[in-house]
Amino acid sequence: MHRVRLHLSAPPRTVQAGVGLHGRTAPEDRFRLPDLWQLHLYDYEAELTVGGTAHAIRPGRVSLIPPDTEAVFRYRGPSEHLYVHFRLAASGAAHDVPLMRDAGPARAAVAESLRRAVASQRSPRADAEVWTVLWRLTEPPPEAPAGPVAAALAYVEANLPRPLAVPEVAAAVGLSHNHLTRLFRAETGTTVVAHIRRRRLERARHLLQESTLSIAAVAAAVGIPDLQAFNKASRRELGAPPREIRAAGRGNAS
């Protein structure tokens, strides 16, 4: 099975949403939900077989499994994902979508909607969040990256809130540390480290000026939880400490 059909004229009915952790005690799970759809957003590598078709699971991929369909998950160790089990109308306007696809640039938004669904169990808010995700999945999948540098840029964007090192980024796109460093500088004119720092501080400026998050929370959200390091990076990249960046944004708003 490669594609599934969604009827989205009416919102889904969310039955359960949560965070699943598998692969700790058994390398394989085999099950079906007789009456419910399954949606998963993955943060690991594994294999999913549905209807005799094997699909590669990778971080950032989303799967949709129809009701009464056997799913076989083969893990490579502890494996965590966000999931939703839901009911969906059987009639109305139909949309054919891939059973497995990459969320691409929408990964962060999909994850946020699913977390809100988890926090709003069995409520209209949960149904609305899942409906939003399903509509996103009717949009064409993102084009494959043009090359390893594009893939590296996408990987950095998806992982800004957590610690990032160049060897990790290089491994994610299938290159050595030195090879990625050379290609990255040739195509972007800067280094991987400088790009990560710049993107973190650009996101920090947005959060400082457009949100009420504390400075400590902003620092953690952009992957620089040490306040002294965050203050230093802000001065270097933005020309002022976080408090002044926030004050300047509020002054412009007035």
Image: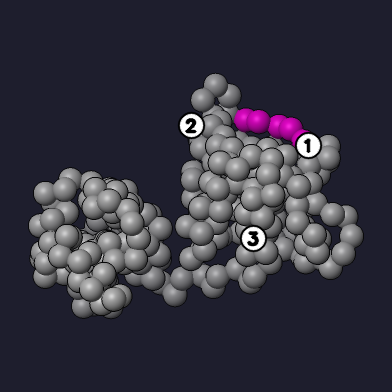
Determine if the magenta segment contains residue 30: yes
Q: Residue furthest top?
A: 25
Q: Which mark is residue 33?
A: 1
For the residue carrying disc 2, how many other residues have a C-alpha within 10 Å: few (<14), some (14-19), or many (20+)? few
Main SS of the magenta segment? strand
**Distance of label 2 from label 3 (alpha carbons):** 29 Å
- Residue type beneath disc 2: Pro
Residue 38 location in percent, x, y? 70, 44
For the residue carrying disc 1, how many other residues have a C-alpha within 10 Å: few (<14), some (14-19), or many (20+)? some
**Is residue 156 found left or right of 5 in the rendered image?**
left
Relative to 175, does residue 127 appear above or below in the rendering? above
Sooner in the amino-acid sequence: mark 3 or mark 1: 1
Q: Point out the image quarter for the C terminus.
A: bottom left
**Distance of label 2 from label 1 (alpha carbons):** 22 Å
What colouring style does the render use?
one colour
Determine if the magenta segment contains residue 153: no
- In percent of the image, x 56 and y 31: which residue is there? 22
Q: Nearer the viewer, residue 8 or 173?
A: 8
Q: Which mark is residue 78?
A: 2
Q: Quadrant of residue 222?
A: bottom left
**Distance of label 3 from label 1 (alpha carbons):** 22 Å
Residue 60 location in percent, x, y? 51, 54
Does residue 191 show up? no
- For the residues carrying marks 3 and 1, which lies nearer the camera in this image? 3
**Is residue 39 found left or right of 157 in the rendered image?**
right
Instruction: Write the start and end of the magenta stretch as one range.
Output: 28-33
